[in-house]
């Protein structure tokens, strides 16, 4: 294959993942829905609120959010006698454990661990001791809306369902407005239609649920436990679904540096998951291989594609078309650098903010890849405001 064709292939893969895959997925989803439109849906069944539910939270220095989070959980419209809330304070050095102990509700069970070991270690320990039928995972700074739990649990009235992922609603810390940019709306769109074709991928840690019997302890160095745990259930052949009406609100990271650091850590976790979940690429996974490659893998390796395109482009500067491509790249990266460095908190038009978001996200992914390769990120906490 010529250098020119390699460049065209890499550009096509990026455009496919971000632009064309949503269209292809939508067409497939509509076709599948037509075939199965007569099947019983979870909403058609009322046999769902008898299930015992364990809400599990792993917390580290969350005194700012923990009381509000627990109040929201205690106010859920799900039968109170069927809810138990288990919180593991993972060696917190602030008042997290103290504030939890002050709440007068016997539905709250505190595990006050003295040593900080990381989120997944806490989850592994708590899950080894509970007996409830369904386990709901959330973050210590996520506030469930009143009916969020009921919307999650209703799907478990269908025996084939082993996992349900809700929707995270990001709120801007300063204004309180919803963070609803183009990228976030597309992600919701993809999750909805991937669920419809039984190709749903990893969950969001702020709000998801699984049947307890399908939980598998994860290694203590696991970085993105929510994605890995949920994917392992799906890869074992169990059905996982997305429920957009089960909503948890969470404040965005206030600082650009904090948000970037969060993305770097998630990026490192993505590569860790990719190399550990090799079965996700096995043909027996059916359509999930398609959704996984299109939605996740191609995006995780977009930073590598972008770097290769730039390097290979340098070898083709004797051709007019590739000179234009090179100039476009230089302009794009320069504008993004200037905006990221000097316009951190400014509201920018979509025409500028979207490419800047894209480049900044891929820069964080590349940074995360370097951390993963050199083993610089562990499973222990690296706390941000979100």
Image: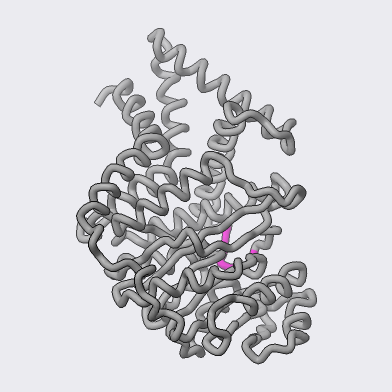
In this view, the residue in front, 314 or 114, is: 114
Main SS category, magenta section: loop
At horizontal 52% and vertical 41% (from top left) the residue drawn is 183
Q: Nearer the viewer, residue 19 or 215?
A: 19
State how many labels appear: 0
Q: Residue at x 37, y 41 (%)?
A: 22
**Residue range of the region highlighted in magenta in the rendering:** 377-381
377 sits left or right of 157 in the view: right
Q: Which picture quadrant has residue 248?
A: bottom right
Q: Position of residue 196 (x, y in %)?
A: 32, 56
Give the x, y percent position of residue 359.
55, 35
Report the residue at 49% width, 52% height from top: 373
What is the quadrant of the C terminus in the image?
A: bottom right
Above or below 153: residue 343: above
The quarter of the picture where residue 17 lies is top left
Q: Is residue 213 left or right of residue 143?
A: left
Identify the coloring: one colour
In this picture, is 372 found above or below 312?
below
Is residue 61 something one can see in this rendering? Answer: no
Q: Is residue 379 magenta?
A: yes
Image coordinates of residue 52 in percent, x first then y, are: 47, 86
Answer left or right for 91 relative to 280: right
Name the residue: 27% across, 22% down: 2
Is 373 above or below relative to 139? above
Q: Quadrant of the N terminus?
A: top left
Of 56 and 278, the residue lying toward us: 56
The answer, for residue 168, to whether it is visible in the render is yes
Asked which quadrant contains residue 206, the reply is bottom right
Residue 195 at what x, y percent from top left?
36, 57
Q: Is 124 one of the magenta-colored residues?
A: no
């Amino acid at each position: 294959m010529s250098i020119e064709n390699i460049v065209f292939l890499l550009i096509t893969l990026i455009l496919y993942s971000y632009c064309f895959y949503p269209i292809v997925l939508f067409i497939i989803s509509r076709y599948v829905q037509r075939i199965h439109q007569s099947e019983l849906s979870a909403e058609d069944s009322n046999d769902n609120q008898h299930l015992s539910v364990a809400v599990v939270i792993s917390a580290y220095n969350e005194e700012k959010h923990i009381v509000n989070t627990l109040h929201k959980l205690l106010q859920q419209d799900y039968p109170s006698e069927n809810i138990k809330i288990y919180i593991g304070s993972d060696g917190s050095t602030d008042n997290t454990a103290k504030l939890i102990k002050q709440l007068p509700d016997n539905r709250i069970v505190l595990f006050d661990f003295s040593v900080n070991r990381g989120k997944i270690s806490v989850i592994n320990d708590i899950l080894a001791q509970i007996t409830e039928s369904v386990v709901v995972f959330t973050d210590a700074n996520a506030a469930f809306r009143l009916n969020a739990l009921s919307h999650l649990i209703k799907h478990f009235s269908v025996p084939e369902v082993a996992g349900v992922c809700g929707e995270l609603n990001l709120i801007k810390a300063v204004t309180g407005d919803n963070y609803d940019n183009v990228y976030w709306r597309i992600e919701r769109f993809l999750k909805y239609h991937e669920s419809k074709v039984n190709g749903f991928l990893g969950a969001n840690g702020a709000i998801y649920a699984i049947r307890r019997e399908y939980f598998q302890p994860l290694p203590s160095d696991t970085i993105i436990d929510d994605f890995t745990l949920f994917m392992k259930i799906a890869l074992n052949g169990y059905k996982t679904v997305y429920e957009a009406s089960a909503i948890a609100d969470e404040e965005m990271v206030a600082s650009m540096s904090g948000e970037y650091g969060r993305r770097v850590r998630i990026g490192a976790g993505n590569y860790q998951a990719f190399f550990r979940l090799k079965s996700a690429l096995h043909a027996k996974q059916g359509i999930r291989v398609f959704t996984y490659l299109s939605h996740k893998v191609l995006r995780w390796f977009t930073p590598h594609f972008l770097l290769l395109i730039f390097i290979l482009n340098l070898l083709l500067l004797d051709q007019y078309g590739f000179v234009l491509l090179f100039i476009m790249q230089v302009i794009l990266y320069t504008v993004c650098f200037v905006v990221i460095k000097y316009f951190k908190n400014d509201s920018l038009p979509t025409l500028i903010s979207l490419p800047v978001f894209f480049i900044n996200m891929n820069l964080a992914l590349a940074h995360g890849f370097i951390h993963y390769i050199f083993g610089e990120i562990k499973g222990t906490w690296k706390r941000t405001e979100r």
